[in-house]
Image: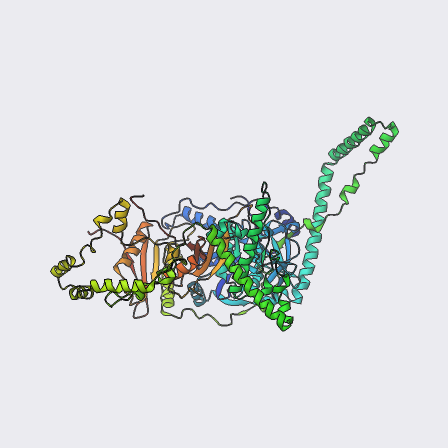
Amino acid sequence: MIKIVLLNGTPLVFNADECAILREKHRICGQLTGCLARAPRQNVQLGVPLQLMPEEVTLLLEKGAARLVRYKTDASHCARVQALYAEYIKTITAEQIELLRQERRRTFEEKRAEILEGKRRKVQRQIEARRSRGETISEEDAGRMENEIVLDEETDKDISEEHSGVQIFRENPWVKDKADAFDAALDGWSYPQTEMERVRCAAFKDLHEKGFFMTNGVKFGGDFLVYPGDPVRFHSFYIVKCIPRDAALRPTELVTFGRLASNVKKTFVLYYLHQDGTARSVSINWTGLS
Amino acid sequence: MKQYIFSPPQMLSASDLLRLKKATDRSLPSVGGSKDYAPNDSILQLKQIENALQERRLLLEEERVVTKALTTIGTWLPEIQMVQIEKAKGKFWQYMGHVERNMLLLFPEEALFLIETGSLLVFFNGVPMSIQDAYHSLLSNDLSTDQYNVFAHLCRLGYIVLRHNDGIHFSYYERKIRLDKYVDLRQGGKVKVGKRSFEEGEGEEAGKVDDELECVARKKVKVEQQQRGEKNGDHRVGSCAKRREASSNCPSEVVHGELANAAAAAVRVHEELTSAAAAVERVHEELATEERPFTSANLDIVFPHMLQPATFETIYFDDLFPANVKVDVAMNAAMFSSTCAATPLTASVAAAMTTRPANWREFKARQHGAHSGRDCLLQPSRLATVNGAYAQLRLSDGVHLTQIPTSGETAEDRFQLSYDVYLPGKHFRKSHAGTPDIRVAVTRADKPPPTLNDIVSLQSRFQDGVPALFAVVDQGSVAFYNFADVALPVDIHT
């Protein structure tokens, strides 16, 4: 079951697989808010964690597709995990150093002839430099120096662990499947409570049942943006605004909504709760007199 | 997109780590391009959606691998809610972090951002924090997810974001004379005044000016901190106060105090404060050339009631006169009362001023009555210039946002400035950051927008022309709003 972690009242999903399942299976998009691993310093494509709207959480809990949990940080650095981590880092570093050493030996073997030639040339240059300074070096001395070129010491130089790669985990791998790291969220989920929250939830549920995808509406001044299919491929059709049943809408507001939507080729939809408790909608279309 | 780095198990093997630590493929899916209008159940469309979702999935599942040599190691200290680092590797220390008690410290939001970008590994109890651990430990009641969201958003764009410093405020003029370069507003909270580094070519004159400005800066710091009720020991005593002993402001003396010493020290502190305030005032007066903007104090003049018998005292405000002007009150009062007696308000005029006309005829009659000439907007005798005519016709003047008098109650908890944002550049010095380029207040989309009072009090609190932006967070998406003055077009310029 998908785990939604409640962090200071914000519902978050930290697992990348679960984010994909939410989108592909349950049509819940959410909003990514973390840095992307491969390109952290840009705002175009963000990464995990995924922040969910409270309406999305209510819907998922109703469907039984997710559970609300609280992450216990104590479990992530207890003695058991310390021991596991110590062993892991020792092993993984040793393995990497061994691999680096093998790599070095391999490159060395491939380029053995070139390296030897380079060293020989270097020694010859040194001899010539000394000869030009006036020293006399006999032929046998020169020969001896060339033979002293030792190659094997290259491969035995120590490789420091600073060259190793370190993985920064998204979720703690030693506790992520353990039951003791998560327990039921203490206060439960009490959304919706006020009347406006109830309208929002009802509108979201109604649209979701009709097969739409929803995201937050901050870009267009509404409560939700409604897409006919996955937002990755389609533009939104509707801008939804939730109003109380007895809202007194001024004509200027109707003009505002109508104009705003028509300028961006969308339709403005007002959702309210009817007396019988169902969510009803009214859309505003700007058209001519005829 | 090219090849992805995808491995189902979360823990990468050694060979994968070595391969990925210098992964150079940073390509992202292209944004934009045409989207489809509506689902049409075609196989092509389904395939396109599937490919896009697959790309997205792979991007999100990619693991972070960093080279150990390039990563800073930090320790989480929950008792002070900071991350301590031994040695900063990389360039982030130029614009993040502060030093306190000989420790290199990072704020929780800075640390969390550095973990997410792969520059920092934070250990707690010997175990490095995963991203999930870091979110849970570093974000708390003081630092909400919304605030971190805004911080990370701005950092990702490249800005330098510091916590809002409600410290010493510099007016536009003070910044122009570079007074803010002498004050070191450290993020840890202490304020230090120090000499700025000299530029080439400046000589002895510059040295003298430098000393003067440093003195003024120290006094300004003292005055402001005293006004905010801080203890004496929080700032350093200036070396320019040579004519008194340096120990006079030392808190230990007052604490240990023989009574006489304590009293003398208190007197000296008071003297220094008043002289410091006077010095700051003198700087403003001697060198300032700008007009002072309106303050609500200017609008406090109370006009006398026109219908009641007036005496000279009701219209004479002696504090508005310059100091060296002496007004003979008795003579003026006598002249005033005789003039009033000579031109009494007739009953009809008094009635006209207090009652509304019953119809148009009465209105026109009043217009041509005793106070004709006052109702024309354009007075022929005052039509000297075109601009003068326009000035008479103008019924309302454009007012600068910072000139609107606030009603006294402040924005308080509704909108608080969270961050000072600086444009990136080589010239940024953490210790002498100076006045920020933008100030940001974080709020939510479901909260009501700011009233005019809120906007004015936020924008005009500092009087230094730095815009105060509102960062509105709606379920994780951030949008920035700015309330700026608009200069309406003027047809005729003098």
Quarter of the figure with residue B444: bottom left
Q: Position of residue B232 (x, y in %)?
A: 58, 65
- Residue B164 place in picture, x, y as percent: 51, 58
Q: Is residue B5 visible?
A: no
Q: How did the renderer colour the structure? A: rainbow
Q: Is residue B336 left or right of residue B321?
A: left
Q: Nearer the viewer, residue A184 or B70?
A: B70
Residue drawn at point x = 76 percent, y = 41 percent: A154
The residue drawn where x is 66% and y is 56% is B86
Between B3 and A191, the residue placed more toward the observer is: A191
Say if B182 sits above or below B354 in the image: above
Instruction: Point out the residue furthest to the left here.
Output: B361
Name the residue nearer the viewer: B94 or B259. Answer: B259
Q: Is residue B426 visible?
A: yes
In the foreground, B129 or B249 = B249
Q: Check the image and report above or below for B203 versus A220.
A: above
Residue B267 percent location from the top left of the image: 57, 67
Residue B62 image position (x, y, % from top left) = 56, 52
Q: In the picture, which quadrant includes the C terminus of chain B?
A: top left
* Number of on-image labels: 0
